[in-house]
């Protein structure tokens, strides 16, 4: 029996804006309502860092790791939608885009003829925070594209910015997209029911910068020029806590995001590592259903990959003794 298309929600925004935190709040809301949610997690690294967290609440999680869904894993998106709808019987879908992904390309991917038979793009939710507007900043590019595509604009991390800076960011955001609803939050604290409530504003004359129904020129196979370097560093063993803290303090300014799961020598808890400027890195004990890959994913532009890798691996307990 043919099933009508199910709702598809897209969560996008710049690196470190708090997308996974918001995703967890939405998943709690849907789970409490008895809905079977299929999650598509797109991460730039070779291993999924956020997928295991979503798996504690979602009915099914498919990881699109190893690159951006707007280019590297774009073809996997339609396959993932089909699997979640046909094989797992999801009631609704949500995609968390990589913080490197161009949202307009993702909108195009989920509205092609094949995918549209299975899922309907219900809402584009953009989670943003004030970042550098330099042309070389990948976060600035992604933020601009997310603003243009969004139905819901959530300005997050208000607690970290002075009022003048925040108001300037808010004003600039509204100029780029006067149609979307605007929310101001800290720690992605928002009422999911209010966020997901039906939109009653007038229909837009132009949906986004994506032209639907128009034949597109095939995208080049090369990665978009704004993409920074995403490096996955697998950890062969538990880390020395003091060495890692020292490594953390030496992260270059060009580093835009670091996240992953680690263990410390002599400590039983699994730890989640999160870093996104302008805040400080956090290391928090966590519990997951399954043991994740122990690895850190580094995302930035122009940093010394080999040096960062070598210095991180030197934090593995016993490495100094081996190298001596």
Image (tube, rainbow, N blue to C red):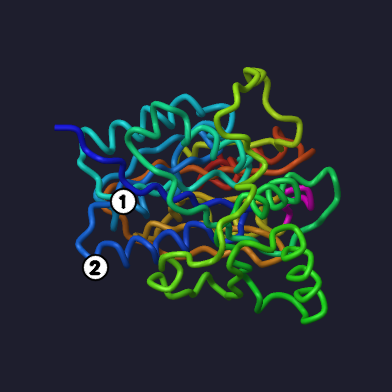
Q: Are the residues tagged 2 and 1 within 8 Å (C-beta)?
A: no
Quadrant of residue 4 in the image?
A: top left
Q: Is residue 286 above or below residue 308?
A: below
Which numbered disc, 2 or 1, marks the residue closer to the eye? 2
Outermost residue toward the right? 134
Q: Residue at x 35, y 49 (%)?
A: 7
Q: Which picture quadrant has residue 227?
A: top right
Q: Which residue is mark 2?
A: 32
The residues tagged by marks 2 and 1 sit, at their Cα atoms, a distance apart of 15 Å
- Residue 197 placement: quadrant: bottom left
Say which of 208 and 160 sits in front: 208
> Which residue is painted at 49% across and 42% down in the image?
295
Vertical relation: 132 (above or below) 137: below
User: In the rendered structure, which segment of residues is drawn in magenta?
Assistant: 250-255
Question: What SS does tag 1 mark?
Answer: loop
x then y, percent, for residue 280: 65, 66
288 relative position to 18: left or right: left
Q: Is residue 23 left or right of residue 179?
A: left
Which of 130 and 196 lies nearest the eye of the viewer? 196
Is residue 324 visible in the rendered structure shown here?
no
Residue marked by disc 1: 55
């Amino acid at each position: 029996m043919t099933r009508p298309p199910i709702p598809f929600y897209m969560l996008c925004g710049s690196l470190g804006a708090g997308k996974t935190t918001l995703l967890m709040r939405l998943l709690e809301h849907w789970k409490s309502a008895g809905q079977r949610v299929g999650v598509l997690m797109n991460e730039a690294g070779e291993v999924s860092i956020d997928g295991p967290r979503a798996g504690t609440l979602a009915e099914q999680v498919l990881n699109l790791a190893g690159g951006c869904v707007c280019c590297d894993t774009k073809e996997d998106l339609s396959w993932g939608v089909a699997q979640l709808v046909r094989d797992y019987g999801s009631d609704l879908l949500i995609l968390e885009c990589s913080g490197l992904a161009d949202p307009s390309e993702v909108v195009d991917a989920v509205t092609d003829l094949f995918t549209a038979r299975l899922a309907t793009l219900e809402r584009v939710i953009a989670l943003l925070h004030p970042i550098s507007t330099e042309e070389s900043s990948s976060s600035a590019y992604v933020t601009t594209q997310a603003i243009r595509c969004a139905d819901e604009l959530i300005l997050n991390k208000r607690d970290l910015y002075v009022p003048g800076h925040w108001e300037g960011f808010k004003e600039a955001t509204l100029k780029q997209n006067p149609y979307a609803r605007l929310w101001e939050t800290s720690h992605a604290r928002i009422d999911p029911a209010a966020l997901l409530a039906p939109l009653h504003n007038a229909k837009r004359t132009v949906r986004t910068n994506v032209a639907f129904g128009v034949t597109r020129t095939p995208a080049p196979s090369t990665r978009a020029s704004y993409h920074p370097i995403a490096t996955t560093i697998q950890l062969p063993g538990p880390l020395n806590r003091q060495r890692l803290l020292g490594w953390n303090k030496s992260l270059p300014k060009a580093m835009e995001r670091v996240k992953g799961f680690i263990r410390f020598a002599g400590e039983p808890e699994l730890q989640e590592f999160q870093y996104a400027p302008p805040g400080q890195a956090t290391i928090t004990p966590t519990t997951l259903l399954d043991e994740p890959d122990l690895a850190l994913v580094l995302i930035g532009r122009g940093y010394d990959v080999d040096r960062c890798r070598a210095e991180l691996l030197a934090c593995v307990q016993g490495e100094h003794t081996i190298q001596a």
